[in-house]
Image (cartoon, rainbow, N blue to C red):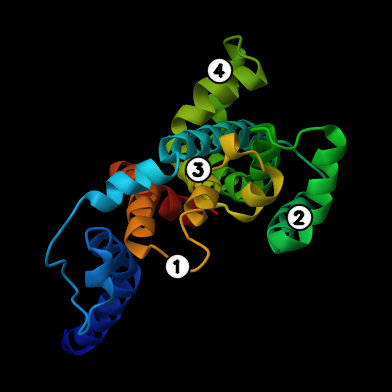
Amino acid sequence: MTGWLQGRPLRLLAAGIVVVNGFFPAVWILLTSFKTEAELVAKPISYWPRHATLDNYVKAFGDQPLLRYLGNSLAVALGSTVVSLVVAALAAYALARLNLRHRQLILTTIVASTMFPLVTLLVPIFETFRSLGLLNTYTALILPYTVLNLPVCTLVLVSFFQGIPKDLENAAMIDGCTRLGALWRVVLPLAAPGVFTAGILAFVNAWDEFLLALSLNASPALRTLPVGITLYQGEFSFPWPIISAALVVAIVPIAVLIALFQERVVGGLTQGGLKG
Protein backbone atom coordinates (compact mmCIF):
# COMPACT_ATOMS: atom_id res chain seq x y z
CA MET A 1 0.00 0.00 0.00
CA THR A 2 2.83 2.38 0.89
CA GLY A 3 4.60 1.69 -2.41
CA TRP A 4 1.37 2.35 -4.30
CA LEU A 5 0.94 5.70 -2.52
CA GLN A 6 4.55 6.64 -3.21
CA GLY A 7 4.19 5.84 -6.88
CA ARG A 8 0.82 7.53 -7.31
CA PRO A 9 2.09 11.13 -7.71
CA LEU A 10 4.50 9.98 -10.39
CA ARG A 11 1.75 8.18 -12.25
CA LEU A 12 -0.54 11.21 -11.98
CA LEU A 13 2.24 13.42 -13.30
CA ALA A 14 2.83 11.09 -16.24
CA ALA A 15 -0.91 10.93 -16.97
CA GLY A 16 -1.12 14.73 -16.79
CA ILE A 17 1.73 15.11 -19.29
CA VAL A 18 0.03 12.69 -21.69
CA VAL A 19 -3.31 14.52 -21.39
CA VAL A 20 -1.78 17.96 -21.90
CA ASN A 21 0.31 16.75 -24.82
CA GLY A 22 -2.73 15.17 -26.46
CA PHE A 23 -5.37 17.83 -25.84
CA PHE A 24 -3.50 21.14 -25.70
CA PRO A 25 -2.97 21.44 -29.52
CA ALA A 26 -6.66 20.69 -30.18
CA VAL A 27 -7.80 23.16 -27.51
CA TRP A 28 -5.42 25.81 -28.85
CA ILE A 29 -6.79 25.36 -32.39
CA LEU A 30 -10.35 25.61 -31.06
CA LEU A 31 -9.61 28.84 -29.16
CA THR A 32 -7.73 30.32 -32.13
CA SER A 33 -10.73 29.69 -34.37
CA PHE A 34 -12.72 32.22 -32.31
CA LYS A 35 -10.04 34.95 -32.34
CA THR A 36 -9.53 37.84 -34.73
CA GLU A 37 -6.27 38.34 -36.64
CA ALA A 38 -5.40 41.34 -34.47
CA GLU A 39 -5.97 39.43 -31.26
CA LEU A 40 -3.89 36.52 -32.48
CA VAL A 41 -0.75 38.63 -33.02
CA ALA A 42 -1.27 40.90 -30.02
CA LYS A 43 1.25 40.85 -27.18
CA PRO A 44 1.16 39.62 -24.52
CA ILE A 45 -0.47 36.44 -25.79
CA SER A 46 -4.07 35.93 -24.72
CA TYR A 47 -5.03 32.29 -24.42
CA TRP A 48 -8.77 32.94 -24.25
CA PRO A 49 -10.44 34.96 -27.02
CA ARG A 50 -11.40 38.36 -25.62
CA HIS A 51 -13.85 39.11 -28.41
CA ALA A 52 -15.04 35.71 -29.61
CA THR A 53 -16.34 35.69 -33.17
CA LEU A 54 -17.81 33.17 -35.61
CA ASP A 55 -16.59 35.12 -38.64
CA ASN A 56 -13.72 32.69 -39.12
CA TYR A 57 -16.16 29.81 -39.60
CA VAL A 58 -18.21 31.86 -42.06
CA LYS A 59 -15.04 32.66 -44.04
CA ALA A 60 -13.83 29.05 -43.82
CA PHE A 61 -16.97 27.90 -45.62
CA GLY A 62 -17.05 30.91 -47.94
CA ASP A 63 -13.41 31.15 -49.05
CA GLN A 64 -13.19 27.49 -50.08
CA PRO A 65 -15.84 24.82 -50.83
CA LEU A 66 -15.36 23.21 -47.42
CA LEU A 67 -18.57 21.18 -47.61
CA ARG A 68 -17.39 19.61 -50.86
CA TYR A 69 -14.08 18.71 -49.25
CA LEU A 70 -15.99 17.15 -46.36
CA GLY A 71 -18.08 15.09 -48.75
CA ASN A 72 -15.01 13.93 -50.68
CA SER A 73 -13.20 12.90 -47.50
CA LEU A 74 -16.27 11.07 -46.24
CA ALA A 75 -16.74 9.19 -49.53
CA VAL A 76 -13.10 8.16 -49.72
CA ALA A 77 -12.81 7.22 -46.04
CA LEU A 78 -16.05 5.19 -46.00
CA GLY A 79 -15.26 3.47 -49.28
CA SER A 80 -11.76 2.43 -48.25
CA THR A 81 -12.97 1.35 -44.80
CA VAL A 82 -15.68 -0.95 -46.22
CA VAL A 83 -13.32 -2.53 -48.76
CA SER A 84 -10.57 -2.88 -46.13
CA LEU A 85 -12.89 -4.67 -43.71
CA VAL A 86 -14.22 -7.08 -46.36
CA VAL A 87 -10.77 -8.06 -47.64
CA ALA A 88 -9.19 -8.09 -44.16
CA ALA A 89 -11.98 -10.31 -42.79
CA LEU A 90 -11.39 -12.90 -45.52
CA ALA A 91 -7.61 -12.77 -45.07
CA ALA A 92 -7.83 -12.90 -41.27
CA TYR A 93 -10.24 -15.83 -41.36
CA ALA A 94 -7.91 -17.77 -43.64
CA LEU A 95 -4.95 -17.09 -41.34
CA ALA A 96 -6.90 -17.93 -38.18
CA ARG A 97 -8.76 -21.03 -39.36
CA LEU A 98 -7.12 -22.67 -42.36
CA ASN A 99 -4.04 -24.84 -42.08
CA LEU A 100 -1.83 -22.61 -44.17
CA ARG A 101 1.81 -23.43 -44.72
CA HIS A 102 4.24 -20.75 -43.54
CA ARG A 103 1.48 -18.98 -41.64
CA GLN A 104 3.95 -17.26 -39.34
CA LEU A 105 5.97 -16.06 -42.32
CA ILE A 106 2.82 -14.57 -43.82
CA LEU A 107 2.04 -12.72 -40.59
CA THR A 108 5.61 -11.46 -40.39
CA THR A 109 5.40 -10.23 -43.97
CA ILE A 110 2.17 -8.39 -43.19
CA VAL A 111 3.83 -6.64 -40.26
CA ALA A 112 6.94 -5.85 -42.34
CA SER A 113 4.81 -4.28 -45.09
CA THR A 114 3.78 -1.50 -42.70
CA MET A 115 7.39 -0.38 -42.26
CA PHE A 116 7.81 1.15 -45.72
CA PRO A 117 7.50 4.96 -45.68
CA LEU A 118 4.62 6.13 -47.83
CA VAL A 119 6.85 8.51 -49.76
CA THR A 120 8.86 5.57 -51.13
CA LEU A 121 5.65 4.10 -52.61
CA LEU A 122 4.35 7.33 -54.09
CA VAL A 123 6.04 7.16 -57.51
CA PRO A 124 5.07 3.54 -58.35
CA ILE A 125 1.52 4.16 -57.13
CA PHE A 126 1.26 7.31 -59.24
CA GLU A 127 2.65 5.63 -62.35
CA THR A 128 0.36 2.63 -61.91
CA PHE A 129 -2.79 4.72 -61.62
CA ARG A 130 -1.74 6.99 -64.47
CA SER A 131 -1.28 4.00 -66.75
CA LEU A 132 -4.71 2.69 -65.70
CA GLY A 133 -6.35 6.08 -66.27
CA LEU A 134 -7.58 6.28 -62.69
CA LEU A 135 -6.03 9.58 -61.63
CA ASN A 136 -8.48 12.23 -60.41
CA THR A 137 -11.06 9.68 -59.30
CA TYR A 138 -12.26 8.41 -55.94
CA THR A 139 -10.84 5.02 -56.89
CA ALA A 140 -7.35 6.54 -57.03
CA LEU A 141 -7.57 7.08 -53.27
CA ILE A 142 -9.84 4.25 -52.14
CA LEU A 143 -7.61 1.50 -53.54
CA PRO A 144 -4.26 2.66 -52.06
CA TYR A 145 -5.92 3.52 -48.74
CA THR A 146 -7.33 0.00 -48.68
CA VAL A 147 -3.88 -1.48 -49.28
CA LEU A 148 -2.34 0.71 -46.58
CA ASN A 149 -5.04 -0.22 -44.05
CA LEU A 150 -5.12 -3.95 -44.76
CA PRO A 151 -2.14 -4.97 -42.56
CA VAL A 152 -3.52 -3.33 -39.42
CA CYS A 153 -7.09 -4.46 -40.06
CA THR A 154 -5.97 -8.04 -40.79
CA LEU A 155 -3.82 -8.31 -37.66
CA VAL A 156 -6.60 -6.94 -35.45
CA LEU A 157 -9.17 -9.38 -36.86
CA VAL A 158 -6.83 -12.40 -36.74
CA SER A 159 -6.44 -12.02 -32.99
CA PHE A 160 -10.23 -11.89 -32.53
CA PHE A 161 -11.02 -14.79 -34.85
CA GLN A 162 -8.52 -16.97 -32.97
CA GLY A 163 -10.47 -16.37 -29.76
CA ILE A 164 -13.76 -17.68 -31.18
CA PRO A 165 -14.33 -21.44 -30.64
CA LYS A 166 -14.26 -23.45 -33.85
CA ASP A 167 -17.15 -25.59 -32.61
CA LEU A 168 -19.56 -22.71 -33.29
CA GLU A 169 -18.58 -22.60 -36.95
CA ASN A 170 -18.67 -26.38 -37.24
CA ALA A 171 -22.20 -26.43 -35.82
CA ALA A 172 -23.27 -23.76 -38.33
CA MET A 173 -21.76 -25.71 -41.24
CA ILE A 174 -23.49 -28.90 -40.05
CA ASP A 175 -26.76 -26.96 -40.21
CA GLY A 176 -26.09 -26.10 -43.85
CA CYS A 177 -23.93 -22.98 -43.78
CA THR A 178 -20.98 -22.71 -46.11
CA ARG A 179 -17.66 -21.60 -44.68
CA LEU A 180 -18.31 -18.07 -45.90
CA GLY A 181 -21.80 -18.27 -44.42
CA ALA A 182 -20.34 -19.28 -41.06
CA LEU A 183 -17.92 -16.36 -41.27
CA TRP A 184 -20.75 -13.93 -41.98
CA ARG A 185 -23.38 -15.34 -39.61
CA VAL A 186 -21.27 -16.55 -36.69
CA VAL A 187 -17.70 -15.27 -36.62
CA LEU A 188 -18.16 -11.62 -37.56
CA PRO A 189 -21.01 -10.94 -35.08
CA LEU A 190 -18.95 -12.48 -32.27
CA ALA A 191 -15.90 -10.45 -33.35
CA ALA A 192 -17.88 -7.17 -33.52
CA PRO A 193 -15.49 -5.28 -31.16
CA GLY A 194 -12.58 -6.19 -33.41
CA VAL A 195 -14.51 -5.17 -36.53
CA PHE A 196 -15.34 -1.81 -34.96
CA THR A 197 -11.73 -1.30 -33.93
CA ALA A 198 -10.33 -2.15 -37.35
CA GLY A 199 -12.98 -0.05 -39.09
CA ILE A 200 -12.35 3.06 -37.02
CA LEU A 201 -8.58 2.77 -37.43
CA ALA A 202 -9.02 2.45 -41.20
CA PHE A 203 -11.46 5.38 -41.33
CA VAL A 204 -9.21 7.71 -39.33
CA ASN A 205 -6.15 6.82 -41.42
CA ALA A 206 -8.01 7.54 -44.66
CA TRP A 207 -9.58 10.73 -43.28
CA ASP A 208 -6.22 12.21 -42.25
CA GLU A 209 -4.06 11.14 -45.20
CA PHE A 210 -2.50 14.01 -47.16
CA LEU A 211 0.34 12.89 -49.44
CA LEU A 212 -1.62 10.55 -51.73
CA ALA A 213 -4.63 12.86 -51.76
CA LEU A 214 -2.41 15.70 -52.94
CA SER A 215 -0.55 13.65 -55.56
CA LEU A 216 -3.27 11.47 -57.11
CA ASN A 217 -6.19 13.90 -57.26
CA ALA A 218 -5.36 17.23 -58.87
CA SER A 219 -8.99 17.98 -59.71
CA PRO A 220 -10.41 20.79 -57.48
CA ALA A 221 -13.76 18.97 -57.35
CA LEU A 222 -12.18 15.89 -55.74
CA ARG A 223 -9.96 17.50 -53.11
CA THR A 224 -10.20 16.05 -49.63
CA LEU A 225 -10.13 18.03 -46.39
CA PRO A 226 -6.37 17.82 -45.66
CA VAL A 227 -5.56 19.10 -49.16
CA GLY A 228 -8.34 21.68 -49.22
CA ILE A 229 -7.30 23.23 -45.91
CA THR A 230 -3.82 23.98 -47.26
CA LEU A 231 -5.43 26.26 -49.86
CA TYR A 232 -6.48 28.79 -47.21
CA GLN A 233 -2.95 30.11 -46.88
CA GLY A 234 -2.08 33.09 -49.04
CA GLU A 235 1.14 33.85 -50.86
CA PHE A 236 2.41 36.18 -48.16
CA SER A 237 0.18 35.45 -45.18
CA PHE A 238 -1.33 32.63 -43.17
CA PRO A 239 -4.88 33.36 -41.95
CA TRP A 240 -4.48 31.18 -38.88
CA PRO A 241 -7.93 31.90 -37.37
CA ILE A 242 -9.65 30.80 -40.61
CA ILE A 243 -7.35 27.79 -40.99
CA SER A 244 -8.06 26.88 -37.36
CA ALA A 245 -11.80 27.06 -38.01
CA ALA A 246 -11.41 24.72 -40.98
CA LEU A 247 -9.30 22.36 -38.86
CA VAL A 248 -12.00 22.28 -36.17
CA VAL A 249 -14.54 21.31 -38.85
CA ALA A 250 -12.18 18.52 -39.96
CA ILE A 251 -11.57 17.29 -36.40
CA VAL A 252 -15.21 17.24 -35.25
CA PRO A 253 -16.32 14.12 -37.22
CA ILE A 254 -13.37 12.11 -35.92
CA ALA A 255 -13.91 13.36 -32.36
CA VAL A 256 -17.60 12.42 -32.50
CA LEU A 257 -16.76 8.99 -33.94
CA ILE A 258 -14.21 8.26 -31.21
CA ALA A 259 -16.53 9.58 -28.49
CA LEU A 260 -19.39 7.34 -29.63
CA PHE A 261 -17.31 4.18 -30.01
CA GLN A 262 -14.45 4.72 -27.55
CA GLU A 263 -15.49 1.81 -25.36
CA ARG A 264 -15.60 -0.54 -28.33
CA VAL A 265 -12.25 0.71 -29.62
CA VAL A 266 -10.47 0.46 -26.27
CA GLY A 267 -12.10 -2.89 -25.53
CA GLY A 268 -11.26 -4.13 -29.01
CA LEU A 269 -7.60 -3.15 -28.76
CA THR A 270 -7.32 -4.64 -25.27
CA GLN A 271 -9.03 -7.92 -26.13
CA GLY A 272 -7.13 -8.20 -29.38
CA GLY A 273 -3.85 -7.68 -27.58
CA LEU A 274 -4.69 -10.30 -24.97
CA LYS A 275 -5.88 -12.86 -27.51
CA GLY A 276 -2.97 -12.22 -29.88
Q: How would you rate the neighbour count of disc 2 (Cα within 10 Å): few for under 14, some for 14-19, many for 20 or more?
A: some
Which dot, 1 or 4, sits closer to the camera? 1
Q: Are marks 3 and 1 in contact (CB under 8 Å)?
A: no
- Mark 3 or mark 1: name the one nearer the start of the chain: 3
Seen at 24% across and 63% down, the residue is 36
| Amino acid type, residue under disc 4 in the picture | Ala
Residue hosting label 4: 172
- Tell me, for residue 203, which label it has, or none: 3
- Mark 2 or mark 4: name the one nearer the start of the chain: 2
Q: CA distance from mark 2 to mark 1?
A: 30 Å
Rendering coords of residue 25 (x, y %): 33, 68
Of the pair 272 and 246, the residue shown nearer to us? 246
- Mark 2 or mark 1: name the one nearer the start of the chain: 2
Rendering coords of residue 137 (x, y %): 68, 32
Secondary structure under tag 4 reads helix
Residue hosting label 2: 122
Looking at the rendering, which quadrant does residue 111 occupy? Answer: bottom right
Which dot, 2 or 4, sits closer to the camera? 2
Q: Are marks 2 and 1 in contact (CB under 8 Å)?
A: no
Secondary structure under tag 1 reads loop
Seen at 46% across and 28% down, the residue is 189
Q: Are marks 4 and 3 in contact (CB under 8 Å)?
A: no
